[in-house]
């Protein structure tokens, strides 16, 4: 006999089982691939924009902290020479209006906390 089998009056050929794939339209497949690539590039672009914004915000925060550190260094060197900076005098007297615009409210809060926690004032 042949390799062909008779099942229910129909001749089956040996080979792969299951459903045969329908003929896929090549143009549609290529278009889906192109669309997927476009979406992938768009997601990548958004991801890089987000990361660049994150880096720039962190860099701005670092610059602000460096400026604050420099201000504290200047205050310390002035106090080592026996001079009390006007900003610290304003903190001690509770005069927030005399504080220069360059000093943040964080600096005034930190200064008050440090002065009162040391028991000096």
Image: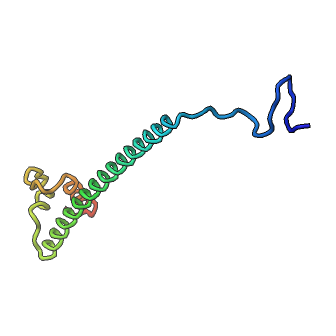
Left or right: 32 as drawn, with respect to 57: right
Lateral position of residue 111 relative to residue 50, left or right: left
Name the residue at the bottom extreme: 81
Nearest to the observer: residue 113 or residue 33: 33
Q: Is residue 83 left or right of residue 2?
A: left
| Residue lying at the far front of the rendered structure | 1
Farthest top residue? Answer: 9
Q: In the image, is residue 74 above or below residue 64?
A: below
Relative height, residue 114 to residue 49 (above, below): below
Q: Image point 15% across, 56% down: which residue?
A: 103
- Residue plotted at (82% across, 25% down): 10
In the rendered image of this protein, does residue 80 appear above or below residue 113?
A: below
Give the quarter of the image for residue 109.
Answer: bottom left
User: Exactly how many numbered labels are in the figure?
Assistant: 0
Please tell me whether residue 59 is drawn above or below residue 25 in the rendered image. below
**Figure quadrant of the N terminus:** top right
Question: Residue at the right extreme?
Answer: 1
Give left or right: position of 91 versus 54: left
Q: Position of residue 69 (x, y in %)?
A: 22, 65
The answer to which of 95 and 59 lies nearer the viewer is 59
Please state, as top left, top right, bottom left or bottom right, where the C terminus lies in the image. bottom left
Q: Nearer the viewer, residue 36 or 80?
A: 36
Residue 54 image position (x, y, % from top left): 32, 52
Front-most of residues 56 and 72: 56
Q: Quadrant of residue 84?
A: bottom left
* Residue depicted at x 15% and y 58%: 92
**How far from the left and from the top, in percent, is residue 61?**
26, 57
Q: Which residue lies at the image location 87% right of the left edge and 29% below the top edge?
A: 6
């Amino acid at each position: 006999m042949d390799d062909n089998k008779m099942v229910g009056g129909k001749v089956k050929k040996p080979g792969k089982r299951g459903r045969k794939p329908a003929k896929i339209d090549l143009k549609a497949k290529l278009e889906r691939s192109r669309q997927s690539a476009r979406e992938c590039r768009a997601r990548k672009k958004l991801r890089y924009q987000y990361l660049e914004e994150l880096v720039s915000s962190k860099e701005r925060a670092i610059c602000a902290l460096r400026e604050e550190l420099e201000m504290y260094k200047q205050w310390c060197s002035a106090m080592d020479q026996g001079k009390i900076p006007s900003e610290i005098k304003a903190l001690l007297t509770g005069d927030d209006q005399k504080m220069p615009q360059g000093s943040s409210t964080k600096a005034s809060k930190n200064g008050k906390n440090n002065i009162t926690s040391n028991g000096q004032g």
